[in-house]
Image: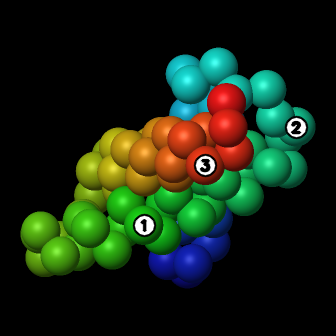
Amino acid sequence: MPVVVLIVVGALAGVLATRLMRENTDLPTAMVIGVIGAVVGGLGFRFLMTSASWVGAFVLALLGSLALIWVWQRFSGR
């Protein structure tokens, strides 16, 4: 169950993050970015706190996705 929640929350966060960062990507790419961002954010969240709510997981997935997009933009030459 937690893996499914991670994928759904990450996908939503990725779509939102690509729109906030004005990154012109297709939906599957935005979802993959979000899932990777959710993993990064989730690891950071677990490092900082022992329990997570879905709101906290979403916020950190969004922050992780935003950070991933920022790094992507810096290294892709945009």
Helix or strand or loop: what does disc 3 sit on?
helix
Q: Which of marks 2 and 3 precedes in the sequence?
A: 2
Q: Residue furthest left?
A: 49
Task: In the rendered view, tell whether residue 61 sits above or below residue 4.
Answer: above
Residue 47 location (% of width, % of height): 17, 76
Question: In the image, what residue type sits under mark 2?
Answer: Asp
Q: Nearer the viewer, mark 1 or mark 3?
A: 3
Label 3, residues with CA under 10 Å away: few <14, some 14-19, many ≥20: few
Tag 1–tag 3 contact (CB < 8 Å): no
The disc at residue 26 is 2
Q: Kindly report the distance in space between the C-alpha atoms of the residues bearing marks 1 and 3.
A: 18 Å
The disc at residue 40 is 1
Q: Quadrant of the N terminus?
A: bottom right
Q: Is residue 3 left or right of residue 56?
A: right
Helix or strand or loop: what does disc 2 sit on?
loop
Q: Residue furthest front?
A: 77
Residue 21 location (% of width, % of height): 56, 25
Tag 3–tag 2 contact (CB < 8 Å): no
Q: Nearer the viewer, mark 3 or mark 2?
A: 3
The disc at residue 75 is 3
Q: How many marks?
A: 3
Residue at image position (56%, 34%) is 17
- Residue 54 in view: no
Task: In the rendered view, tell whether residue 57 sits above or below residue 14.
Answer: below
Label 2, residues with CA under 10 Å away: few <14, some 14-19, many ≥20: few
Q: Which of marks 2 and 1 precedes in the sequence?
A: 2
Quadrant in the rendering for residue 32: bottom right
Q: Nearer the viewer, residue 43 or 3?
A: 43
Residue at image position (44%, 46%) is 67
